[in-house]
Image (cartoon, rainbow, N blue to C red):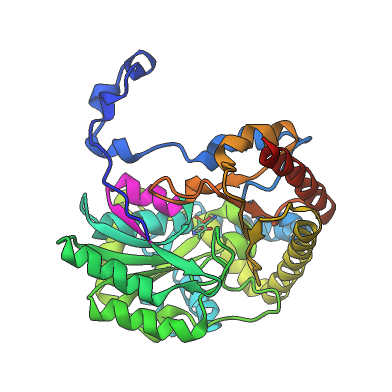
Amino acid sequence: MTASQPPEHRPGSEPGRHNLDPHLDRYAARTAGMTASEIRALFAVASRPEVVSLAGGMPNLAALPLDSLSGQMAELIAEEGLVALQYGSAHGVPTLREQICEIMAMEGITGHPDDIVVTVGSQMGLDMVTRLFCDPGDVVLAEGPSYVGALGSFAAYQAQVVHVEMDDNGLVPDTLRAALATAEREGKRVKFLYTIPNFHNPAGVTLAVERRAEILEICAEHDVLVVEDNPYGLLGFDGQTYPALRSMDPDNVVYLGSFSKTFASGLRVGWVLAPHAVREKLVLAAESATLCPPTLNQLVVSRYLATHDWKGQIKTFQENYRERRDAMLSALEQHMPPGCTWTQPDGGFYVWVTVPEGVDTKAMLPRAVTARVAYASGTGFYADGFGSRQMRLSYCYPTPERIREGVRRLAGVLESEMEL
Ligand code: PMP
């Protein structure tokens, strides 16, 4: 387990930066923690057609029924246009909130529609939850590695991230205990545990069912809230689902859900299911951020759920991603040099690779791009600079052929790196 220090709150202190931005002295102290994610910086090069990008996490939307969706959107405007194009409540469209309850029931959650707040993607949920709970210097516990967008939100509110170890079965309860004990010894206030229990981004592992109750108990004992981020939970390759942490301790878990991976990421519709007492504050936070989530997009999702075989569509996504996962794992097996290890995802989008000592995945990246393959280097997934021997490979978007070619190219780059 590793800890990171809060950022220096001197936004204008970087030498030479004034020449680039005359407003540097004006920024709020909290902007010091806001830095461009390595992954976003990669986007431009990685999206060149000759580069096989194993870097991004874009869902493969080619499997969506675009014809019927376009008909449905036209109908929506014709039949409900004056509602769809109007402001709505910060809480979200009521019918959609009821449908969301049915979806969450698939993972054992019995939530009330009133306790759901619809968000502009679950990224907004992460921002709101951090805004509600974290003062500068408060500790957030998060798996190491963790989702880069969550780390961005924590940094934006000057929370201190303390990473907790994972193994092939997800978060390790004993390291959680140790992290809590250390924080308590140091007099730090731990606000919540942020966890991605299913098909982790970026680690590709799933929290073992038998660990779930234990982790909840530890958090309850230490009076620490749990923030459960679960955008991939329905994307298990054998159709398997796991009991949500929220289903096991409704009063101490804030649950974040999203339609980005099971339907359409561009619609930006997600949700937060909060303990009842927190709901009111969440609505106020949502109101001050966006007034209300987009009514049109919520109604598109709601109609889609009511009129399409959305469970069948999820099955199609599962099959698509399973084929791509298989292509990636077999290519890794075939091509990777000795000393490399990787995780074996049963769902979701990502494989987490560890390379031999002496190889720095961040330094290697420009050479990989020259060899026409891109990945996300591991350091972006830690708040404390760890991860230089790790990388995240995504199999969600490229075709199986491109994945195989990408892994072959990557293995070639790694081999020359290891000879240096
Ligand atoms: N949490 C995790 C773990 C994710 O992987 C992502 C998307 N990559 C998000 C949240 C944000 O998703 P959304 O599109 O719903 O904002």
| Residue in the picture at 32% in, 45% down | 156
Please state, as top left, top right, bottom left or bottom right, where the C terminus lies in the image: top right
Range drawn in magenta: 149-163
Magenta-drawn stretch contains 157: yes
Residue 178 place in picture, x, y as percent? 30, 70
Name the residue furthest front.
419
Residue drawn 59% across the image and 46% down it: 376
Q: Position of residue 203 (x, y in %)?
A: 55, 61
- Closest to the observer: 34 or 127? 34
Res. 87 in view: no
The image quadrant that residue 409 belongs to is: top right
Q: Is residue 411 visible?
A: yes
The answer to which quarter of the image holds residue 204 is bottom right
Q: Looking at the picture, does residue 398 appear above or below residue 211?
A: above
Q: What residue is rendered at 24% in x and 81% in y? A: 221
> Going by the image, does 295 lie left or right of 29?
right
